[in-house]
Image (cartoon, rainbow, N blue to C red):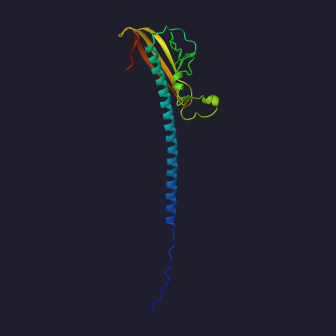
Amino acid sequence: MSENIPLPRRRQRGIALITAILLLLVMTIMAISMMRNYGVEEKIAGNTREKERALNAAVSAQQYAEYWLSANTAPVASGCVGIVSSNIGQVCSAPLANFGALPWPSGVTYTQFTSDLINGVTNTLAAGNNAAQGTYYAAPVFYITDLGPNKGTPVGELYQIDAAGYGGTPNAVAVVESTYVITSNTAHSLDP
């Protein structure tokens, strides 16, 4: 008969437990890092969307101003002292002192932009809350400056068009500019 003789037990050191805890700690740090990066990427995507909305609003106002200049006989330039509706329009004899300082003290509000239900305009500061999706902080504005006769070809009157558009907040702003020559009621863009 053989007897089972108990073998002396070795002391366990807990290496498996320590390794598992360290791996769990590393995975937790990686998960937290990934969640933070996701939040930052989401903010970047939102800011990019608002920048594009502001740029599209500014380009829309610029294109309307170009259309307005080419569709009408060249209007007489005057000293512009305020903001008027695009139904009236105006051409200014002097450029704005600082196009980067918004809102502009004078110019033309592109009212056709806000007539569509999709392009609503909500002043977020007055409302006291965040802008809803599909709304803009303010209507786009354009400013047309009569620069005088064009010295090159084509012969005609030279105009500079500056336009500003907003996204959903006052911080999302874009300003664009173009130069136009009107000859015999025909517009020629001088921009590349």
Q: Residue at x 47, y 88 (%)?
A: 3
Q: Residue at x 47, y 27 (%)?
A: 56
Relative height, residue 141 to residue 132 (above, below): above
Residue 73 quadrant: top left
Q: Residue at x 50, y 44 (%)?
A: 38
**Percent x, y of residue 83:** 57, 16
Relative height, residue 24 to residue 72 (above, below): below
Residue nearest the observer in this picture, 59 or 43: 59
Rendered-image quadrant of the N terminus: bottom left
Q: Outermost residue, bottom direction?
A: 1
**Percent x, y of residue 65:** 47, 18
Rendered-image quadrant of the C terminus: top left
Q: Outermost residue, left direction?
A: 153
**Percent x, y of residue 20:** 50, 61
Residue nearest the observer in this picture, 125 or 12: 125
Relative height, residue 40 to residue 57 (above, below): below
**Percent x, y of residue 103:** 57, 21
* Count of marks, rendered view: 0
Q: Is 188 on the left or on the right of 126, as rendered?
A: left
